[in-house]
Amino acid sequence: MNTSLTWVEKLVGSLDDKKQYRDYRARVKRLPGDYRATAEALERYLTHVGPTSDSAALLALLTDLVDTLERGVAAGEAVSTVVGDDPTTFADDLLRRHPGESWLDGWVGSERARLTDAVRAASTGGAR
């Protein structure tokens, strides 16, 4: 792919990323109802705590999710067998395989800094 962005991509973002996301959504839509509902719930969780600052990492994560679910459908497994007893463990395992920065990381970092500054100020007599 050409490394220089077209004016459209500069304005709206990567067209390849948008196509890949649309392909992912189409694959989710083709899943059986229980798998589709599970995919949508997992997507919501993953997009809140996952690598939202890096579109390539997020798309890889979502593609891995739908690949895993499609394999479960093909094998005739119940969605609960694929995801396991604890869906958060399943989701967190996906996140470990696809690390990246989340919007939460910045927020947590700023809150940690705020807490540290407040405690330092309190310990040096600067508390209000």
Image: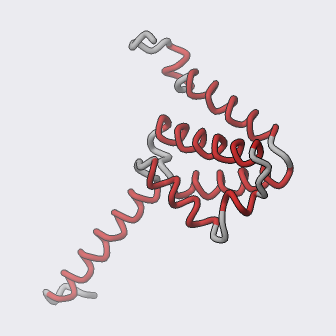
Q: Residue at x 52, y 38 (%)?
A: 60
Horizontal arrangement in the rendering, residue 34 relative to residue 87 (left or right): right
Front one among 9 and 80: 80
Horizontal arrangement in the rendering, residue 32 relative to residue 82 (left or right): right
Front one among 53 and 11: 53
The image position of residue 13, as x and y in percent, is: 53, 26
The image's colouring method is: secondary structure
Residue 108, by quadrant, is bottom left
Residue at the farthest front position:
75
Residue 15, by quadrant, is top right
Q: Residue at x 19, y 81 (%)?
A: 120
Residue 118, by quadrant, is bottom left
Q: With respect to residue 69, does 125 lie above or below? A: below
The image position of residue 82, as x and y in percent, is: 68, 57
Horizontal arrangement in the rendering, residue 31 relative to residue 99 (left or right): right
The image position of residue 14, as x and y in percent, is: 53, 24
Q: How many marks?
A: 0
Q: Residue at x 34, y 63 (%)?
A: 109
Front one among 51 and 125: 51
The image position of residue 83, as x and y in percent, is: 66, 60
Q: With respect to residue 57, does 44 lie above or below? A: below
Residue at the farthest left position:
124
